[in-house]
Amino acid sequence: MTQLRIAVIVGSTREGRAGDRVAGWFVDQATRHDDLAVTVVDLSDYDFPASYPAEPTASIRAFVSEVDRADAFVVVTPEYNHSFPAPLKQAIDYAYDEWQAKPVGFVSYGCRSTGLHAVDQLRTVFTALHAMTVRDVVGIDLLAGESIPQCTDELRRDAGVLLDQLRWWGLALRDGRAARPYVA
């Protein structure tokens, strides 16, 4: 069986962000599983235009290609003002068919809320794109002293549960897309 290709999308582009450290910790958890091939897709590595262009730029095409290649996704997102970052929404909107019939999991972080307001809104966005969001989330409270990458046993368990759900849905949907193309 071929490995399940998981794209870990770092959704914050702010200077001084915690997102790269959170993503690094999660990638470390995921790469302990031989049946997963993990790729980091850091939005700060893409030079997206300020406004939606008439034709896709090279950066847009490169991002959409990463989305297309993946069997499943983990979105690492902060919560800013009870929502997720604008650059993440912009990137999500550049792809459409490439998200369909693929599972999406979330690793969120914030102050006290653990980023769950952002996850709730992202679930709505991904449902509109015909993606399947998995139930469990890894939520990190930056004010609770949960330092990355020295996370708690509970966070490691949460990551394991998220990866188990993502693996199940990822394999089921990959097999389903191979047997019968998804029609939106």
Image (tube, helix red, strand yellow):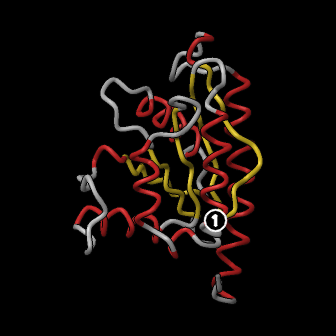
Q: Is residue 117 left or right of residue 49?
A: right
Quick check: 51 above or below 114? below
Location of residue 33 in the rendering, given as x and y in whole percent from the top left corner: 61, 49
Q: Is residue 44 left or right of residue 118?
A: left
Label 1 Cα neighbours within 10 Å, binned few <14 / some 14-19 / many ≥20: few
Given the image, on which type of amino acid does mark 1 rest? Ala
The residue at 54%/57% (across/down) is 6
The residue at 26%/52% (across/down) is 50
Q: Is residue 162 left or right of residue 59?
A: right
Q: Kindly indicate the quadrant of the structure image that contains residue 2.
A: bottom right
Quick check: 91 above or below 130? above
**Observer-nearest of 48 and 166:** 48
The residue at 27%/52% (across/down) is 46
What is the total number of numbered labels drawn onto the structure image? 1
Q: Name the residue carrying label 1.
A: 128
Q: Secondary structure at mark 1?
A: helix
Q: Residue furthest bottom?
A: 180
Q: Kindly indicate the quadrant of the structure image that contains residue 59.
A: bottom left
Q: Kindly indicate the quadrant of the structure image that contains residue 57.
A: bottom left
Location of residue 139 in the rendering, given as x and y in whole percent from the top left corner: 65, 30
The residue at 64%/81% (across/down) is 184
Question: Which of the image's four quarters has the N terminus?
Answer: bottom right
Q: Is residue 143 left or right of residue 169?
A: left
Location of residue 85 in the rendering, given as x and y in whole percent from the top left corner: 46, 40
Quick check: 173 above or below 127? below
**Observer-nearest of 50 and 156:** 50
Location of residue 90 in the rendering, given as x and y in whole percent from the top left corner: 40, 54
